[in-house]
Image: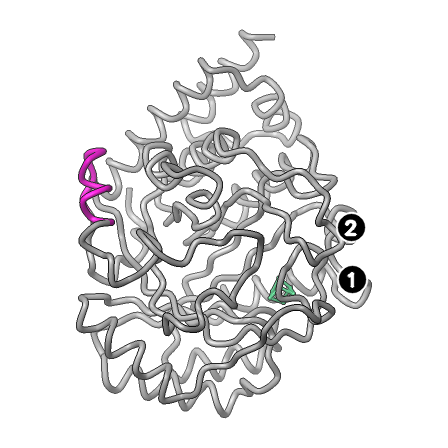
Amino acid sequence: MADAVFDIIERLLKGEDLAPQEYETLIRERTPETQRLLRQKADEARRRVYGNKVYTRGLIEISNYCKNDCLYCGIRRSNRACTRYRLTEEEIEECCRTGYGLGFRTFVMQGGEDPYFTDEVLTGIISQIKARYPDCAVTLSLGERSRESYRALREAGADRYLLRHETADAAHYRKLHPPEMSFENRMRCLRDLRELGYQVGCGFMVGSPEQTPATLAQDLKFIECFKPDMCGIGPFIPHRDTPFAQEAGGDAAFTCYLLSIVRLIHPPVLLPATTALGTIREDGRQMGILSGANVVMPNLSPAAQRWKYELYDGKLHSGDEAAESRDKLAAHIAQIGYQLVMDRGDVKHII
Ligand code: SF4
């Protein structure tokens, strides 16, 4: 079997498409040796496209109200223990002003699917940010919306949209989401975003309940076909007030293995070393970067609200996670041989 794995790796390195069964073999046959090899090759691939740069995005968590009830999520609508908040337009503007002063040139507005943020409200906020900071990119991560809504937000100036697909296996999707949410609609959203000219990010959790090597292989195949501009991959971490409270969490090394594979499938992808990875291991972010990640997203939200955006237990919101600690984060990244940069860091299409 070992030879079969190395044959698959060789084809991956040549940029060939793989069958889902081959991705599954790559996952099932993970050894310290394959992990080391893929990490090294992923690092080389990333350096060919982006050098040793690690891009920075300023994350603004605009609301933890959500009309949805995803089973894994700490801010799901059924969680009565969640302390809800919503930033005002002035608070969002204040976050951007602070972030711009700190050098950030991408603002990521993330939130639950909060009905308060209508197209009218959001287009007002986006156009104001773009008018004040024309050299900045605006990324949205606000869940599923209609094509018309995505179009209005794009026309107002939004450049990028992050929408994790969570799992590319429809049956697995149904196990993670309530019946009113559908895999088909999630895929429709991603297609619409791409067609409307956004730089699009998808992504998934590693170790989510009932995930298997076969479902993960579908995720990798999806990434190979869709070729996202960004891809958020972090370990699943259970939240105490969700139906998955007693489930086991994801593993850092396995997450890093998948980061390396995704980098090799699509070398230009912008790949964050996620907060979740930094939450389960103190050196998680560094591990992620060494495995092929090249983006970090420190938190620019008002300090008093950060703890409330608790998607999973123990989510970090201070230290390297905090935008104010940018210099410390830069030093940690420099220690492992990479350079934190603050420019817009758009996806590069040419390898
Ligand atoms: S994962 Fe997103 S859409 Fe689902 S409940 Fe949480 S915030 Fe809402």
Q: Is residue 122 above or below residue 60?
A: below
Q: Please tell me whether residue 336 belongs to the stretch shown in magenta.
A: yes
Residue tagged by mark 2? 175
Q: Which residues are magenta?
A: 329-339
Q: Amino acid at mark 2?
A: Lys
- Looking at the picture, tell me which residue is in the foreground, 242 or 211: 242
State how many labels appear.
Answer: 2
Q: CA distance from mark 2 to mark 1?
A: 8 Å
Q: Secondary structure at mark 1?
A: loop
Q: Position of residue 302 (x, y in %)?
A: 37, 74
In the image, what residue occupies the spot 33% across and 37% down? 286
Residue tagged by mark 1? 178
- Looking at the picture, tell me which residue is in the foreground, 181 or 254: 254
- Identify the coloring: one colour
Q: Is residue 177 left or right of residue 226?
A: right
Q: Is residue 340 left or right of residue 237?
A: left
In what quadrant does ligand 1 lie?
Answer: bottom right
- Looking at the picture, tell me which residue is in the foreground, 272 or 149: 272
Q: Please tell me whether residue 117 belongs to the stretch shown in magenta.
A: no
Q: Amino acid at mark 1?
A: Pro
